[in-house]
Amino acid sequence: MSKKAPNKCRFGYPFKIENEIRIDFIETTNNVKAEIYLKRNDPYLNMHNRSICHNWRGNVDLQIILDKNAAINYMVKYATKSEKTGKSLQ
């Protein structure tokens, strides 16, 4: 649960049930952002692709990045993310 909003998940769960796949385009001052909503029948399930999950045999949070700047920001954030110290480092 989030510290800012009690009783509200910081990841946005539960999600809205989606009966069909849809893409919403949101215009900002500099670019256009696309939000993709996949068909969903469970409010607590990540967006996923059945073929990828079958072949990978693990949980995959599927997201599509259409904006070059969003991809760069994601890669920089991921690459500079600090790891939590564990007992093995001590």
Image (cartoon, grey):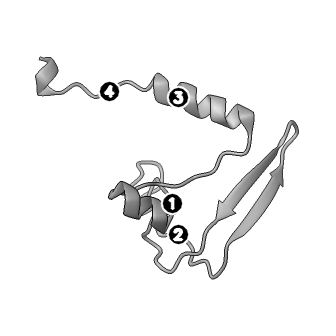
* Disc number lying in front (2 or 3): 3
Of residues 11 and 37, which is closer to you in this image?
37
Quadrant of residue 82 in the image? top left
In the picture as drawn, the residue positioned furthest to the right comes out as: 29
Identity of the amino acid at label 2? Phe
Horizontal placement of 87 versus 30: left or right? left
Q: Residue at x 88, y 39 (%)?
A: 29
Q: How many marks?
A: 4
Q: Residue at x 41, y 48 (%)?
A: 3
Residue ID for mark 2: 15
Q: Which mark is residue 77?
A: 3
Alpha carbon of mark 2 to alpha carbon of mark 3: how far? 25 Å
Q: Is 50 situated left or right of 68 in this image?
A: left
Q: Residues within 10 Å of mark 2 (few under 14, many from 20)?
A: some
Disc 4 marks which amino acid?
Answer: Glu
In the depicted structure, whether residue 41 falls above or below residue 29: below
Give the residue displayed 51% in from the left and 60% down from the top: 12
- The residue that disc 1 covers is 12
Label 1 with label 2: CB-CB less than 8 Å: yes
Spatial CA span between label 1 and label 3:
20 Å
Foreground of the two, 17 or 5: 17
The picture places residue 66, in percent across and down from the top left corner, at 72, 45
Q: From the image, tell me which residue sits under label 4.
A: 83
Tell me where residue 40 appears, x and y as whole percent.
54, 75
Q: Residues within 10 Å of mark 1 (few under 14, many from 20)?
A: few
